[in-house]
Amino acid sequence: MNSDHSNALFQRATRCTPGGVNSPVRAWKAVGAAPRFIASAYQAYVQDEDGNRYIDYVGAFGPAILGHAEPRVVSAVADQARSGFSYGAPTRLEVELAELICAVVPIAQKLRLQASGTEAGMTALRIARAATGRRMIVKFDGCYHGHSDSLLVRAGSGAMTLGVPDSPGVPPELAQLTLVATYNDYASVERCFDQHPGEIAAIIVEPVAANMGVVKPRGNFLQQLSALAHRNGALLICDEVITGFRLRFGAAYELYGAEPDLIMLGKIIGGGNPIGAVAGRAELMDLLAPAGAVYQAGTLSGSPLSVRAGLETLKILAADGTYERLEAAGAYLESGFLSALTASGVVGCVNRVGSLLTLFLGVGEVGNAVQAQRADRERFARFFRAMLKRGIFLPPSQFEALFISLAHRREDLQRTVEAAMESLLESGSI
Ligand SMILES: *Cc1c(COP(=O)(O)O)cnc(C)c1O
């Protein structure tokens, strides 16, 4: 497999961009390879600058639930582009997207569109702090909520992959306001409230963690968090940037009996274009300017191109049987990977919810970030490279989820399982 063009581009990129990429995980550092530069993508495939085609499980890190370049979404965006990109004035499209989301997410009485999930996290915290008059927040080790200062503490995703648990440049005074609890460990959250009575504005959580690899909430963990927050006058923020419209048509918190006050959305609702959103109870949302005094703004907030792509994507997802198909594809891959583990004698486990899946190598069970960190990253790196060679494009870190799309056909999944079988065997030898 030739990668001359990618390698040459990466060299040029490192001269003009820090680390050669515009988001850290894309550099493939954790898997000991130089990144492939992607020239195009369609359906379940990406194609690199050297003309190699891969079955894609990065899925743009979440948005590409329909697969790439879905024709209806492409023509909606092209149509929108002919009417101008952005106006600095409200549009009908924004009303339609807000109405659609508010109709299917019970706690979303109002919604504010933004340009990224990071902004949604910043804004949700600002609302929570303003509403409660408190300063502290509780987040979970290994959960990622974007790269804003308050939330970049023991974050998952690239921060975990690169071993940058606490970024330089985040003032300690601010980081101190962020308490870190252990996912799936209710007692660790209770301790935060015991130690800081009356000071915690909100708990923020991914209802299904997907940035330390996929980790499911156990038992009634999310229900307990809701009750604890509310008993103590704090808010619960569910970060649904990945899980929203990924696990069902709407928010995932309902699957687990959580009662958030605010949710964050992003990724899928922009149909592959930049987007983020905060939604929640009307009296909280109305704290935002110009209804209230909490300031938040954005030149490209609710960009017509993003909103049009998102609306079209959601229309397609709303069809009957969509989530059943995603579940079936996920289940197929899970059982194939499990068989491959057994057949190869490699220790590992598969964590999966619907079309989100992580194959952890070297560990038998992962329920939190400490357990995730015990995974065998070296073996994962070898596995990743062996899969790449066989035309399978995995997320380049042990701590990212595979994203399955509606475009993945049975034969794509079959080829992936066959490749996994061979790659696991190969990953044992160096
Ligand atoms: C991707 C992600 C974000 C941040 O969204 P961006 O659009 O990358 O800023 C926030 N929360 C979760 C759970 C995410 O996966």
Image (cartoon, helix red, strand yellow):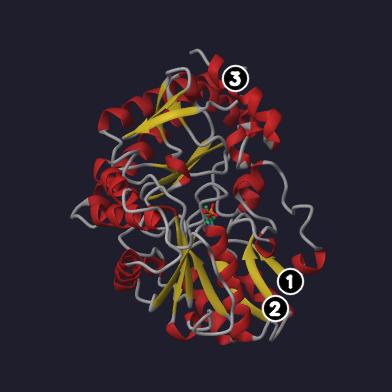
Give the SS element for disc 3: helix
Residue at 36% of width from left, 37% of height from top?
A: 333
Give the amino acid at mark 1.
Leu
Q: Quadrant of the C terminus?
A: top right
From the top left corner, tell me how far across and down residue 75 is, in percent. 26, 44
Q: Which mark is residue 7?
A: 3
Measured Cα–Cα span from mark 1 to mark 3 = 43 Å
Mark 2 or mark 1: which comes first in sequence? 2
Quadrant in the picture for residue 9: top right
286 w.r.t. 163: above or below:
below
Q: Which residue is mark 1?
A: 177
300 w.r.t. 32: above or below:
below
Mark 1 or mark 3: which comes first in sequence? 3
Give the amino acid at mark 3.
Asn
Mark 3 or mark 2: which comes first in sequence? 3
Q: Which residue is mark 2?
A: 135
